[in-house]
Image (tube, helix red, strand yellow):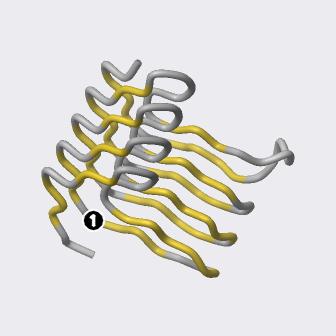
Amino acid sequence: MNNIIMNAHATDNAGGAYITGESTLLKDNKFVNTSSGQVGGAIQLKTNNSIIMNNEFTSSFANTSGGVAYFEGENITITHNNFTNNHANNLGGAIRWNSGNESAGKVTENRFEDNY
């Protein structure tokens, strides 16, 4: 909580943070100008029962999917975050959710601006 991750790059996945496990809380952080060579320009989350809230994601890039985030898991809540000026070359300028379950989580009360 309350971290600033800036100008971070990964050649493979998760430019800012790679998170695994159960019941993760990612709250009150800033990710600025992060990138990855594959998925999750800022974060890759492989977890269930997690909350992503009150974060700012600005100018993140993923070469394939999830300019900001690449999620694999269920019961994930994404709420009250700002996603601004993020990009992916393939899928999900801001978020790519890789789950076969349509009710894998919920995205509520976020701000998405200039993501492509």
The quarter holding residue 93 reads top left
Residue 22 higher or lower than 77, as above or below: below
Q: How many marks?
A: 1
Q: Is residue 99 left or right of residue 84?
A: right
- Compared across the picture, whether 48 is left or right of 6 comes to right
User: Residue 51 at what x, y percent from top left?
Assistant: 53, 66
Q: Is residue 19 above or below residue 74?
A: below
Quadrant for the C terminus, please: top left
Task: Name the foreground residue: 78 vs 95.
Answer: 95
Residue at 52%, 52% (x, y): give it: 78
Quarter where residue 94 is shown: top left
**Circle 1 sits in a helix, a strand or a loop, which is it?**
loop
Q: Residue at horizontal 41%, vertical 55%?
A: 14
Indicate the amino acid at tag 1.
Asp
Please give the name of the residue rendered at 49% of the width and 57% of the height, measured from the top-left corner: 44
Residue with the most extreme bottom position: 22
Question: Residue sitting at 64 percent across and 81 percent down?
Answer: 22
Quarter of the image that includes the N terminus? bottom left
Query: Which residue is under mark 1?
Result: 28
Whole-percent x, y for residue 49 in the image: 67, 72
Q: Position of residue 84 (x, y in %)?
A: 27, 31
Q: Is residue 95 left or right of residue 42?
A: right
Please rate how many residues cluster around mark 1, counting C-alpha atoms within 10 Å: few if below 14, some from 14 to 19, many from 20. some
Which residue reaches farthest front?
11
- Determine the image quadrant of residue 43: bottom left
Please state the horizontal and vertical placement of residue 79, each as a whole percent of the image.
48, 51
